[in-house]
Structure formats: C-alpha cells, structure tokens
Image: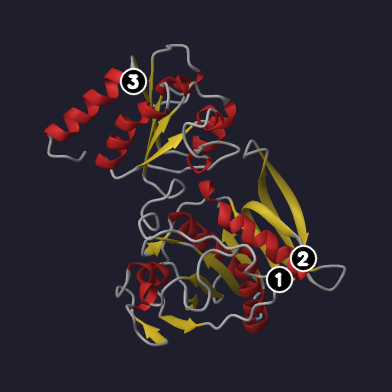
C-alpha cells in the first residue's frame, strides 16, 4: 500500500501536527507499505541542499524528521515552482501525485490548511473526504469496484466518535492530531527527495496567500509546546503585553478565547476552541478564561492545564491540574519577574 501525506513546515522543520499525521499514515500503510510525503518548501529543508537521491537523515531538521517517521520518498515543490499558499493549486499537485504514484490513500493533518487542501482535493477528484479520523483501515473491495475503508472519526468537536465505512479509491482523510502521539518509526528510513514540477490549471492560483519574511516561520499555535491563553479577564488589547512577554520567555505563543476575537482584541488565528484551533501543548496556561465548553474542546488535549483566575467558581478550574486564584495582572508580571531572575527562561 502507498500512502501520501501532506507535510506542513513550521519554520525549517516539519510541523508537530504533520508528524502526528505521519504516525497515523505509517499505521495505515502497514508493514511493507510505502509512506511518501508531499512538502511545499525549499529542497534544502529536506536534504541540506543536496540533489535528488538518497538524503541521509540528519542533514536538515525536516529531512531528519521525515526519515525518522518512516518516509521513504519526499516530493518537494519549491517556491520557485509554486510560491505561497494556494489551496486549490496544492490540491492539484496532490491529485497529480496520486496518478503518478498510484497512492491508495492521501492524508493530511486536520489543521486549517490540511482541511482546506483536502476539501479541494475531494472536489477535484469527485471523491468523498473523511475529516478528523482517529483510525482507518482498508477492509476490502466496495460494491462500486473501489476500496472500502473502516474509519473512526471525531464528531461534535471530539465529544463523540463515529464508526463509518468510506468507499473511495484512493481514500482521502484528515487526521485528528490531538488523539495521535507523534511516534518515530523503529529505525530511520532511507529518504529519497524528488523535486516535483507541478502541472496547474487556469485559475489554480486565483487565491494565494503569502507571508512576509518577518512573519513566516516560528512556532504556530497548533504546534506550540507552550501556549499562554488570555480571555475576557485580560481586560483589553493592551492587557496582552505581559502574556506576550511570558510566552516569549517560555518559548511559546499566545492563544485566546472566542470572546477576545469577538471583541476585536486579537486576530481569529489565535483563537483556541471548537471554532478556532485545537491545541496539544505540554503546558496551557489559561489566564482570565472562564472555560466555556467550546473553549475546552480546543484545549482538552493539553498535557498540563494551569489556570489563573479571580473567580474560584470558573469552569476552567475543573479542567486544570493547578490553579491560582488571583488577579492575573499581578500574577503574570510576578511570574515574568521570577523567570527573569532565574536567567530569562523557565
């Protein structure tokens, strides 16, 4: 079996959500199966600038990670061929690679980009796409001549699981990454990098997003190991300065509740929750957040939740491992000062 997996880059390395998707994809491919990655970025991020061919693990962060997770072939589409994020064009590339490789399944992490690209791929191919899967296995031929896949996927923001049969060749799915731990293979694979020339159709680049050099890269909300959350209790846009400083000291990012984006204090891309980003950090520090069920749906997979809230009855406290009942405007600056006193990092 051959499984294609869309891998997103976070800076120069593979995003954590994509490593989780690769873990899922490797299980789908099974023993003796082939796992291939599709990467939109610089070839140097995979093979240290080497030409196509064997790329030893360790020459570059992303290439090392792909090999460690069992990827044998990586198809790289460089910015010179396709610059920026163009969801329809990315889907067109995946469709072409399906034909080229004879892939049995195409997977992507259930991120904003992964979900959008896979939806476009379903539209291009006329095939169904299963979202937020936690397991998938080919069970045999379907009545229409294609393959039947038994899948389990999240519904209602993960509040329930659905058993379903997917009839599709190839199978198209996104991975509910909050239920999959990133697990390297037993031994690194010999990674071969294939520069890929995309064949696009008119209009594929009609919608394209680019990032400035100062904003690209770095840690994203979906992949951060530390997230400092801010809610209504922060008080307004200016109240996020201490949270930003704390996040920088801890090597993390700032996330927010829905009310913060509704008030226009922070952009939607920073929202944690059912209608925002689902996060899986080692530490989620929730400051001034009441803990509505929609927000909990986005942060429940954090390994450790710590709450800072002046309301001892706030719902977030029932989900927190530790809690500080107090004024965040005093607690956070004190924490920042304590970290600085220890040398600038936790």
Q: Are marks 2 and 1 in contact (CB under 8 Å)?
A: yes
Q: Is residue 169 left or right of residue 110?
A: right
Q: Which residue is mark 3?
A: 328
Q: Are marks 3 and 1 in contact (CB under 8 Å)?
A: no
Q: State the image coordinates of residue 53 (x, y, percent, origin top left).
A: 41, 88
Q: Which residue is mark 1?
A: 170
Whichever of callouts 3 and 1 sits on the residue coming sooner in the sequence is: 1
Closer to the observer: label 2 or label 1?
Answer: 2
Question: Residue 216 lies in what quarter of the image?
Answer: bottom left
Q: Nearer the viewer, residue 149 or 254?
A: 254
Mark 2 and mark 1: Cα distance apart in space: 8 Å
Secondary structure at numbered mark 3: helix
Whichever of callouts 2 and 1 sits on the residue coming sooner in the sequence is: 2
Q: State the image coordinates of residue 8 (x, y, percent, origin top left).
A: 48, 62
Question: Residue 295 lies in what quarter of the image?
Answer: top right
Whichever of callouts 3 and 2 sits on the residue coming sooner in the sequence is: 2
Q: Which residue is mark 2?
A: 127
Q: From the image, which quarter does the N terminus lie in?
A: bottom right
Does 159 sit above or below residue 28?
Answer: above
Q: Is residue 266 left or right of residue 166?
A: left
Mark 3 and mark 1: Cα distance apart in space: 51 Å
């Amino acid at each position: 079996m051959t499984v294609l997996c869309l891998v997103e880059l976070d800076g120069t390395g593979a995003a954590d959500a994509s490593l989780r998707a690769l873990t899922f994809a490797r299980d789908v491919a099974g023993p003796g199966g082939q796992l291939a990655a599709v990467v939109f970025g610089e070839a140097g991020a995979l093979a240290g600038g080497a030409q196509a061919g064997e790329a030893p693990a360790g020459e570059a962060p992303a290439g090392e990670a792909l090999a460690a997770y069992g990827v044998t072939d990586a198809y790289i589409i460089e910015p010179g061929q396709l610059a920026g994020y163009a969801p329809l064009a990315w889907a067109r590339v995946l469709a072409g690679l399906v034909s080229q490789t004879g892939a049995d399944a195409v997977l992507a992490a259930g991120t904003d980009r992964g979900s959008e690209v896979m939806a476009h791929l379903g539209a291009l191919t006329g095939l169904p796409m299963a979202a937020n899967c936690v397991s998938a296995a080919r069970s045999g031929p379907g009545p229409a001549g294609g393959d039947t896949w038994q899948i389990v996927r999240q519904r209602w923001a993960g509040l329930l699981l659905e058993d379903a049969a997917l009839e599709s060749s190839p199978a198209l799915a996104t991975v509910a990454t909050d239920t999959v731990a990133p697990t390297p293979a037993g031994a690194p694979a010999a990674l071969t990098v294939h520069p890929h020339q995309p064949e696009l159709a008119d209009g594929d680049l009609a919608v394209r997003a680019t990032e400035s050099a100062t904003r690209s890269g770095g840690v994203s909300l979906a992949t951060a190991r530390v997230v400092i959350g801010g809610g209504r209790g922060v008080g307004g846009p200016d109240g996020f300065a201490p949270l930003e400083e704390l996040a920088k000291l801890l090597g993390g990012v700032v996330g927010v509740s829905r009310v913060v984006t509704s008030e226009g204090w922070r952009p939607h891309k920073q929202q944690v929750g059912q209608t925002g980003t689902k996060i899986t950090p080692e530490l989620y520090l929730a400051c001034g957040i009441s803990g509505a069920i929609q927000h909990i749906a986005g942060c429940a997979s954090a390994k450790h939740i710590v709450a800072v809230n002046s309301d001892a009855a706030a719902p977030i406290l029932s989900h927190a491992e530790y809690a500080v009942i107090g004024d965040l405007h005093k607690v956070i600056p004190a924490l920042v000062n304590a970290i600085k006193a220890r040398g600038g990092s936790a």
